[in-house]
Amino acid sequence: MKVILALGNPGEKYTNTRHNAGFLIIDKFASENNAVFCNKPKFSADIAETNISGEKVLLIKPTTFYNEVGISARAILDFYKLTLDDLLIIHDDTALDFGKIRTRKGGRDAGSNGLKSLHAHVGSDFWHIRIGTDNLLRRQVGDVDFVLGKFNSDEQKILQSWILPESINLIEKFINGTIEPFSIKY
């Protein structure tokens, strides 16, 4: 079994915000695989199940808000008796330019409260797909307003045409055991 956990905030007001880049990707992946999310309070998450190449895959959108996603991850790993090798995290990253995608296993939190929560609850030796969101607007409005701001129309086009398909390809590589560390830019 594999667990794909996206970082983001629940609720309509956070839809299409930079902090919810992970939710956008996992929603697209779920849609392409006919997986439907259901709320599972005992896991503090909305969960969808699918099967890819004979592998059961859980798609997770924590309902704890971004800064407490580790609670959900811990509950799921414990219940299903999984290890960090079975876990892929998808999240936005303001340390990367918009349009850059990076995969790696392990690493530091780089100031991300979501990653800090994961590290505190499950450790840090998991795979992650980092979606770059940085642009010049961040310096003008500050980090909080920036990550909770919506993608502009140009960013939306790049998300739809390149970031979503490339990220879905990386999810499939993780499930099939062929993911490798790399960095790619639009």
Image (tube, rainbow, N blue to C red):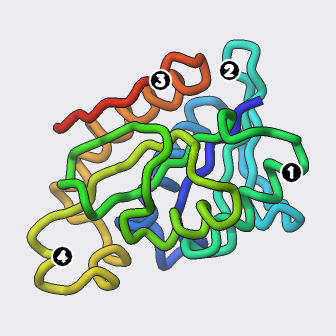
Closer to the N terminus: mark 3 or mark 1?
1
Q: Is residue 158 above or below residue 43?
A: above
- Is there any visible trace of residue 11 in the rendered image? no
Q: Which residue is mark 4?
A: 138
Q: Residue at x 61, y 24 (%)?
A: 175
Q: Amino acid at mark 4?
A: Arg
* Badge nearest the viewer, 1 or 2: 1
Task: Report, in whole angstroms, how far the alpha carbon at label 1 lies from the one at label 4.
Answer: 37 Å
Check whether the beta carbons of the residues at disc 4 and disc 2 lie within 8 A of each other.
no
Q: Position of residue 27 (x, y in %)?
A: 55, 47
Determine the residue positioned at 73% across, 67% down: 71
Q: Nearer the viewer, residue 87 or 120?
A: 120
N-terminal of the pair, mark 4 or mark 2, is 2
Which residue type carries mark 2? Answer: Ile
Tag 1, which secondary structure?
Answer: helix
Residue type at tag 1: Asp
In the picture, the disc for residue 78 is: 1
**Badge 2 local density, few (<14 within 10 Å), some, or many (20+)?**
few
Dot 2 falls on a residue whose secondary structure is strand
For label 3, the SS is loop
Label of residue 52 in the image? 2
Instruction: Give how far apart the Cα atoms at labels 4 and 3 are.
Output: 31 Å
Q: CA distance from mark 2 to mark 3?
A: 15 Å
**Residue at which label 3 appears:** 179
Indicate the position of residue 9 as horizontal and vertical percent values.
55, 71
The quadrant of the picture occupied by the N terminus is top right
Label 4: element kind: helix
